[in-house]
Image (cartoon, helix red, strand yellow):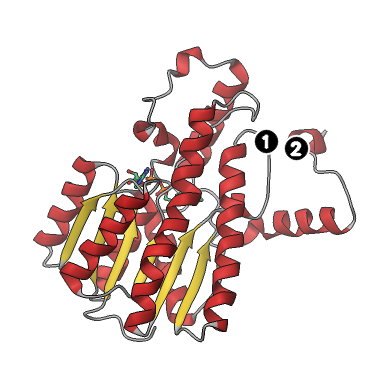
Amino acid sequence: MDEFKGKTAVVTGGASGIGRAMADRFATAGMNIVIGDVEPAALEKVLGEFKAAGVKAVGLRTDVSKEADVKALADKTLEAFGGAHIVCNNAGVGISGFAWEISDEDWRWVMGVNLWGVIYGIRHFVPIMIKGGEGHIVNTASMAGLTTGPGMSPYFVTKHGVVALSEAIHQELMMAQANIGVSVLCPAWVNTRIGESDRNRPGGPVDETTLDPVRQAMQTAIRGALSEGLSPDEVAEMVFQAVVNKTFYILPHAHWKDLIQERMENIIHQRTPVPREFRMK
Ligand SMILES: NC(=O)c1ccc[n+]([C@@H]2O[C@H](COP(=O)([O-])OP(=O)(O)OC[C@H]3O[C@@H](n4cnc5c(N)ncnc54)[C@H](O)[C@@H]3O)[C@@H](O)[C@H]2O)c1
């Protein structure tokens, strides 16, 4: 896409963090904004701020893991602005722990938001974009979609799924001769509220006082890394440039590329993956 003014950007998980920053960046480019987010108060706040700044913005309380909610968001987008040009399937959550100890509910929660949320976004927005004749999809995966490690298996599983889905739909859209670009956003640490994802957990926030020491240490390490991460605004600018330049893989943390290379070489040379702490000894 070359021209943004007066066109429409849809962002799921747009009431906080990276989603909010992407919405801001697209608004700065003169676009109408549609926000879908599961948190009603945060959604109202962001819509109020957009309206006060003179941005044409609408929103809907949306749980992206529910297909009916994502369809309703697409209907609302059409009703408000008649089309969708940039669609950011961005809402995401994480939980730490060993794979065998994470409950069914938590596995389903993370899979529902991070993977099914993107699948539903594609299903309900791509036909609108094809009809409109142009567009760009930005799926938020993570560096966790290109590498693996211990302690967050549902997150790794879903983010690898988002990368695979993005690669597949990009090729399908080319085959369909649709004028729709795709980017997959794969950041490492960004300073957002993802470490408090359990604020939206169906079973309520995790009682961290009951966690075993290993999981407590994981939580502390994750929060520390997040607080030192890139700012959401820096990431949003990279996303904007990727849409302009039609860049497929968005890798905001260039110095993490060696981990991607290491994983690929492990696969090619049939080396067993080992956690970092063990390797450093
Ligand atoms: N922060 C990081 O370090 C980092 C790194 C890589 C990828 N990501 C990804 O970036 C995306 C945005 O996360 P963030 O870091 O900005 O976190 P965040 O918690 O600040 O924002 C996430 C937003 O998603 C919303 N959300 C949660 N569950 C939802 C649901 N079921 N339906 C709709 N909205 C829902 C939240 O209310 C929140 O507004 C996620 O997909 C995350 O996995 C984050």
Figure check: 176 above or below 94: below
Secondary structure, mark 2, is loop
- Judging depth in this view, the residue of 263 and 12 nearest the camera is 12
User: Label 1, on which residue?
Assistant: 150
Q: In the drawing, does residue 119 fall left or right of residue 202?
A: right
Picture residue at 16% right of the left edge, 48% below the top: 44
Question: Would residue 13 be visible to someone looking at this image?
Answer: no
Q: In the drawing, does residue 145 fall left or right of residue 276?
A: left
The reply to whether discs 2 and 1 touch (Cβ–Cβ < 8 Å) is yes
- The image shows residue 8 at horizontal and vertical percentages of 26, 73
- Quadrant, the C terminus: top right
- Judging depth in this view, the residue of 234 and 43 nearest the camera is 43
- The image shows residue 55 at horizontal and vertical percentages of 15, 67
Residue 213, quarter of the rendered image? top right
Q: Earlier in the sequence, mark 2 or mark 1?
A: 1
User: Label 2, on which residue?
Assistant: 275
Picture residue at 89% right of the left edge, 52% below the top: 270
- Quadrant, the N terminus: bottom left
Badge 2 local density, few (<14 within 10 Å), some, or many (20+)?
A: few
Total numbered labels: 2
- Judging depth in this view, the residue of 258 and 9 nearest the camera is 9
Secondary structure, mark 1, is loop
Figure check: 39 above or below 235: above
- The residue positioned farthest toward the top in the image shown: 210
Label 2 to label 1, Cα distance in Å? 7 Å
Q: In the drawing, does residue 1 fall left or right of residue 100?
A: left
Residue type pointed to by label 1? Pro
- Judging depth in this view, the residue of 254 and 208 nearest the camera is 208
Residue type pointed to by label 2? Pro
Picture residue at 22% right of the left edge, 70% below the top: 78
